[in-house]
Image: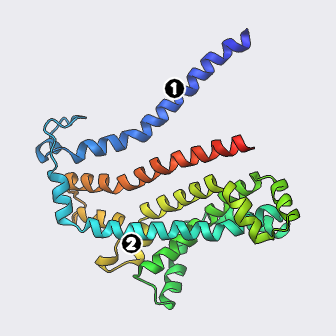
Amino acid sequence: MSAFRGRGPARAGQYAALLAYLAFLVFPFLWLVSTAFKPARELGAPHPTWIPQDPTLDNFRQALEEQPLLRAAGNSLIAAVAAALLAVAVATPLAYVLARHRSRLTAAATGWVVASQAFPLVLLIIPLFLILKNLHLVDTRTGLVLVYLVWSLPFALWMLTGYVRAVPRELEEAAAVDGAGRLRTLVSVTAPLLAPGLVATALFAFVTAWNEFFFALVLLKSPENQTLPVVLTHFLGAEGAADLGPLAAAAFLATLPSLVVFAVIQRKITGGMAAGAVKA
């Protein structure tokens, strides 16, 4: 009985910590939404309120008129989708090799994948810029996609390696007995079971590329090639003064695609995992 009594306060503490963490995450988004719908007089009020007293869409209209948000969103979408698809396509066979053929070389490769995530962006931007300059890919969406691929590939590889290791070897051995080769086994047996992992990896790469700012700021100079995070900085004045209403409206619009993608794909990830558990 004492063990069960001890679980109550511990479980309550866990739920309280989870609620506090969720509140910490949700608060900035709720304040952003509130600010996006407030008129100018409420934004400058000495005592701001959570709920706009006189909601307006003027901030959205002004944001769309002042900056090319739709064009920038298209650039971000192209870069994010291309980087996500390429990351999954490149990481899947590499993850299979790392998971199925363990050796000192694969252990060293796995260690390099983890260690590469510790490098700050400042150390990478100069070599990447010089490489893209020699390839004549500076200020191009192709060059930006390649940079996003390089940046997201280590973590995508690390994620997919764990998913591949969770696939039973017996299934692949049965396919080999039936005469299937390595490529056929990977495509017909392993890949369907990796569907939740592939979707999760693609989602990670997409969100990373969609929200990325530093690489896009340095590598893209032409206004027609700039991505959405870079265009959002145009709402800041020369002295750092922000046009708060339009900025909040633009930031809210920039957040919606990633939220929608996550909401749609999250159900497929959960459903795929549940189906895999039932089959197992």
Q: Quadrant of the image for the C terminus?
A: top right
Q: Secondary structure at mark 2?
A: helix
Mark 1 = which residue?
Answer: 16
Q: Residues within 10 Å of mark 1 (few under 14, many from 20)?
A: few
Q: Residue at x 22, y 35 (%)?
A: 51
Three-letter residue code for mark 1 = Ala
The picture quadrant where one finds residue 230 is: bottom left
The picture quadrant where one finds residue 231 is: bottom left
Q: Nearer the viewer, residue 240 or 153?
A: 153
First of labels 2, 1 by sequence position: 1
Q: Residues within 10 Å of mark 2 (few under 14, many from 20)?
A: some
Question: Left of 132 or right of it: where is 139?
Answer: left
Q: Where is 39 relative to 227, above or below?
A: above
Q: Residue at x 64, y 45 (%)?
A: 273
Three-letter residue code for mark 2 = Leu
Residue reaching furthest front? Answer: 178
Question: Left of 158 or right of it: where is 12?
Answer: left
Q: Nearer the viewer, residue 256 or 186?
A: 186
Mark 2 = which residue?
Answer: 217
Give how far across and how far down residue 178 sits, in percent. Answer: 85, 64
